[in-house]
Amino acid sequence: MAVDIDDLQALALSRPTEALRIAREVLANSPSDAEAAVAHQAIGVVHRDFGDIQEAVTELRSAYRFARRAADPDREADVQASLGVALVMAGQTDRGVAMLDAIVPGRTGVHAGRILIRRAWVRGALLGRYDEALADAEQAVALLSDAGDLVWEARALTHRAMVLLAMGAIDRADQDYARSEELFSDRGQIAEYADTRQARGAAAFARGDLPAALRYLDDAQRVVEEELGILEPDLYANKCLVQLAAGLTRDALTEIDSALGRIEQQRGSDARRAELLYCAALAANASGAREVAESRGRAALKLFRRQQRPWWAARAELALLQSRYDGGDRTVRLLRAVQRVSAELDQLDPDLATEAHLLTGRLAFARTDPATAGEHLSIAAAARHRGLRTRGAGWLAQATLRQGEGRSRAMLAACRQGLSLIEVYLRTLGATELRVLATAQGSELAAIALRYAVRRHNARQVLEWSERWRATVLAIPPVRPQEDDELVADLAALRGLTHRLEANYDHGPAAGPLQRERRRLEASVRRRALLAPGTVEAGPEGERSGGARSEGELSSDAGPGGAGSGGERSEGERSSDGRAGGDAARTVRPFRTADLLDQLGGRSLIELTEVDDQLYALVVARGRVHLDLVGPVAPATHRLSHALFALRREASGRGTNQLDLEAIGARLETLLLGSSVRHLDDGPVVVVPTGRLHAVPWSLLPSLRDRPTSVAPSAAAWLRARKAVPPATDRVVLIGGPKLSTGHEEVRRLAQLYPDAVVLTDGAATAEAVLKAIDGAALVHVAAHGTFRADSPLFSALQLDDGPLTVYDLERLQRAPHRVVLSSCSSAVGSPSGADELLGLVSALAALGSAGVVASVVPVNDPGTVPLMLDLHVRLRSGDGLAEALALSRAAAGTSRFARTAAQSFIALGA
């Protein structure tokens, strides 16, 4: 059987499973020495790339013996190059490097280029000797570019890109990857094409372009699984790290667990299993599963040490130590272990060493060891001016260091700069979910500053730092929809399928496949949304704003925007190409207490904030800001659950009586507001709750029962809503969904109030018709059932005639309606996420620009809701605002049990 060396080698890197089969057939049919060399080398390369290093070394040694007997010097050298790489991967570094160094001299042309590629990979990917690796890669590219062998030219470009990426030259690396990707695709090298897509994902991640990174990795995964049908552990490991960076911990844990199960079932490579165990430990720790993180981390560390892989071992040990710290371990034993790992990573991975030094410093501070803390935090803080991977940790280290030194001015400046950096990152993300999750990266910085302000009992400073990292996503302009026919098709298919399931058209065996298809469609919609690009392109790694203030320029009383910082640029103010100073990415004007005082007029504002599990109330009234400690957060959240339960029972007719509700409201007020109500003025109130306390029926509280009360995610969001410009149109849209116990009575009676309104009911309330009608409308009223999805809040929906209208559908609007009344169950409920953000229907409307929304915090009784809504609209037509109209309608609800309960269940959000 004649075998062409290049064909079989190319197959080993394109369709490895097929290459293994053919190579074994060759060996089973009495091959010549040259053929046996080819077959053993192909098998060795496949084993090497699958992580079966010892098997690879054995096969490649056999290939070398046969190549020597075949008396072909070029083939012998090529096999030696493959063997040298495998020896280094097996931990025999000196021997493998010596073998590669010995065969390079005297080689010319194509053969020299192929050997240099292998040595470049060893020097760069395994040894971190990037200058030497780049020299080899540059020479390989020069030798192979004009040789006519496009596959090897592509490999040379890929290896040069790998080195350039490691050296921080991200754009040059991506150019090489793009060219090699094209060549691999043209030549049918499917596995290498997938590897290059994965590498481009790494480049996008390094640039800070998370949506692009996810897009490349998803595409690589599709090729590997659907076209090659193989398990690629590297891909899962890399995707897990990107997902964890994005805050997608549940996704990361699910996918990495699946890959780990498959590799264990297939009894795959121990090397790849160790890498998956390491990633699984990271995902488990991020999910709060400490015991799982501990067991997987220990298993990964044991394997890496046995395999003599020091870089991986150091990473695994750091993850294990971080998990123990997160679990409350503050022992001297842990401190010594983290110090040792920090020193190891200084030599192996300077970027990761930043995280190790930060952990060491924080642990040393916890153990009152300021000298050790200062040493390690200083090292970590130096990274705040390096690449994107380390800058966030660097600013946190700087803030922690200055906090420990008692240098409050520098500490606050570090917090401000770190948060500005994260704001830039938020703008590179298009998906609401990713933006919300990313805010968690600033939680510790915001907490440091807020804790300091509370300790000083400086009410204005507490207010301004509370505002600095609250409802951050709402302050960033939303990404307007791009044309995505496949997303629209998936949403339509999901809507139809859900409608079919919920209408009970399908029973028995058919329901199972339909539910699986529903889950598949939801996953597809969510995946497409996550890949949406942001409003700002991610800039090159390491690029910094030239105009930011230095860390010492703020006074100790400075808020998050800096003392008198009306005109300076922050690190958050970048143009769309990532450079400082452009208008496209200019941050929203910082919150200022003076602006709030100017706009409140006769209103009072209560803002709740959490610091170290204690609830504080800030009251802004009569030109002053007051700060009161209310008490622990846990009893307040428990009492809120009790109040919501009581309201739900009352709405269903099984509940308590009004006196019981009043007592529940009084107890709830004590735990939510404490004595802070004494500072309130006599007029309307604006309430800014925390994320966990967003769905409070505020009219149950005695001090707010008779007041117009509006709810806002932040004081800054309320100010923006106040200044929102109504649309030029006065279009009113009335929508009636299906299966209401009152039919369409509510919409028909409202249509009499608004004779020129667009009315969609009786089968006309379809998703596309509703989206078209409400886009940019002045006022929208929706009488429909609502569903809140705690498992996936962006699939929370309003039930229309053709199925659910989800948050993903609403995000397709070009302009949100100015004011919205959601006469539907639990429409105000959202899912707390990120730092202090919400995901749900109302938060989506606010993010898109709606100035005000009326919605309910619990399921409501349909007949009891109709008169409330009618009265509300009468008052809106007379010129009252949402909060004023709702308060007056509540007072006029009468003594009917259901009407009174419905009135207490709705809140007015916005202005």
Image (tube, rainbow, N blue to C red):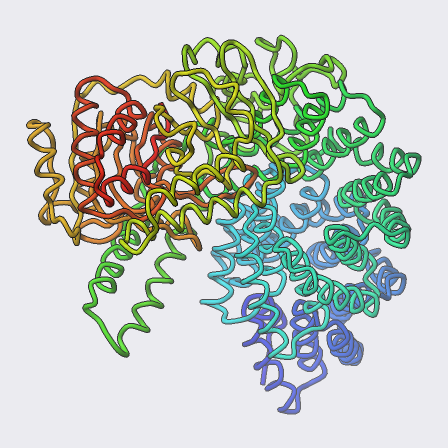
Viewer-proximal residue among 824 and 702: 702
Q: Position of residue 680 (x, y in %)?
A: 48, 19
Query: Is the residue 598 above or below the residue 784 in the image?
Result: above
Residue 116 visible somewhere in the drawing: no
- Tell me what residue is drawn at x 49 percent, y 33 percent: 689
In which quadrant of the rendered image does the N terminus lie? Answer: bottom right
Figure check: 880 above or below 495 = above
Residue at the (52%, 17%) spot, across then down = 620
Q: Position of residue 299 (x, y in %)?
A: 75, 68
Q: Residue furthest right?
A: 371
Question: Where is residue 746, by image quadrant?
Answer: top left
Q: Quadrant of the C terminus?
A: top left
The residue closer to the viewer here, 614 or 555, is 614
Residue placed most toward the observer, 7 or 500: 500
Residue 769 coordinates in the image, percent (x, y): 17, 41
Residue nearer the viewer, 17 or 712: 712
On the picture, is 363 further left or further right than 385?
right
Residue at the front extreme of this rendering: 659
How many numbered dots are placed on residues in this image? 0
Residue 704 at what x, y percent from top left?
40, 28
In the drawing, does residue 900 fall left or right of residue 429? left
Quarter occupied by residue 484:
top left
766 lies left or right of 421: left
Determine the residue positioned at 51% across, 43% down: 833
